[in-house]
Amino acid sequence: MKKLLLSLALIVGFTAVNAQTKFPKETLAPQKTKVEVKKKIDALVVGDAPSQEKKANSTIDFESKVVDYGTIEHKSDGVRKFVFKNNGTEPLIIKNAKGSCGCTVPTWPKEPILPGATAEIGVKYATTRIGPFTKMITLTTNASKKPVILTIKGEVNPPAKEETVPERKTKGSPVEKK
């Protein structure tokens, strides 16, 4: 058995070593590559679309990127808002806003936000889900290639249980089965 395993190991080792591609010594040396740098010139022509490569000079500055619901009651109002301002020199466009799950639904302005203008992003959390929660809203804007992450958190209390005492029949004695 030992001879068989040793033979098998030698065959696998020999195959693995010879399976590698061998390169001549001249290809192992570092190669010099020629890099060409081209300048991009944007000409302003009537009817031209703005260049996608040009970074927009718009910003999105939030009063707070976290909304804390605190402890709320079951099936209470789950609507909150994030207030932000465009402090840039060009209009801000929110391309998309996406909640981390179906229980978090964001609403955002579809029209461009002008420089210096303030706007809101609404968020509705489904308060039918009981317990603590932390959810993310991801914004895609023209202000940055990196998405903006907003957070909501809080805790939903379970519904109040009604305290009822079962009714007890006190009329007569129990019926005997015959």
Image: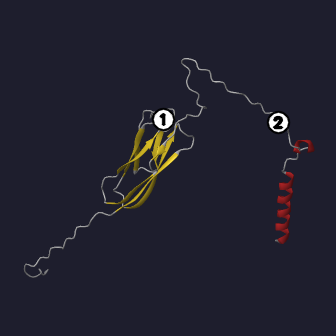
Residue 93: assigned label: 1
Quadrant position of the N terminus in the picture: bottom right
Residue 159: x and y in percent read 29, 63
**What scheme was used to colour the molecule?**
secondary structure
Residue at horizontal 56%, vertical 26%? 50
Q: Residue furthest top?
A: 46
* Three-letter amino acid code of the residue under disc 2: Thr
Label 2 environment density (alpha carbons within 10 Å; few <14, some 14–19, many ≥20): few
Q: Using the image as rendered, state which of residue 86 and residue 2 is in the foreground.
A: 86
Label 1 environment density (alpha carbons within 10 Å; few <14, some 14–19, many ≥20): many
Residue 47: x and y in percent read 54, 18
Residue 133: x and y in percent read 42, 59
Of labels 2 and 1, the one closer to you: 1
Task: State the SS at label 2.
Answer: loop
Residue at horizontal 45%, vertical 36%? 116
Q: Are marks 2 and 1 in contact (CB under 8 Å)?
A: no
Left or right, residue 62 beside residue 56? left
Residue at horizontal 56%, vertical 44%? 146
Name the residue beneath numbered marker 2. 33
Q: Quadrant of residue 165?
A: bottom left
Task: State the SS at label 1.
Answer: loop
The answer for how far apart the CA atoms under marks 2 and 1 are is: 40 Å
Q: Quadrant of residue 29?
A: top right
Residue 36: assigned label: none
Q: Residue furthest right?
A: 25
Residue 131: x and y in percent read 38, 62
Left or right, residue 96 beside residue 158? right
Residue at horizontal 22%, vertical 67%? 162
* Three-letter amino acid code of the residue under disc 1: Ile
Tell me which numbered mark, 2 or 1, is placed earlier along the sequence. 2
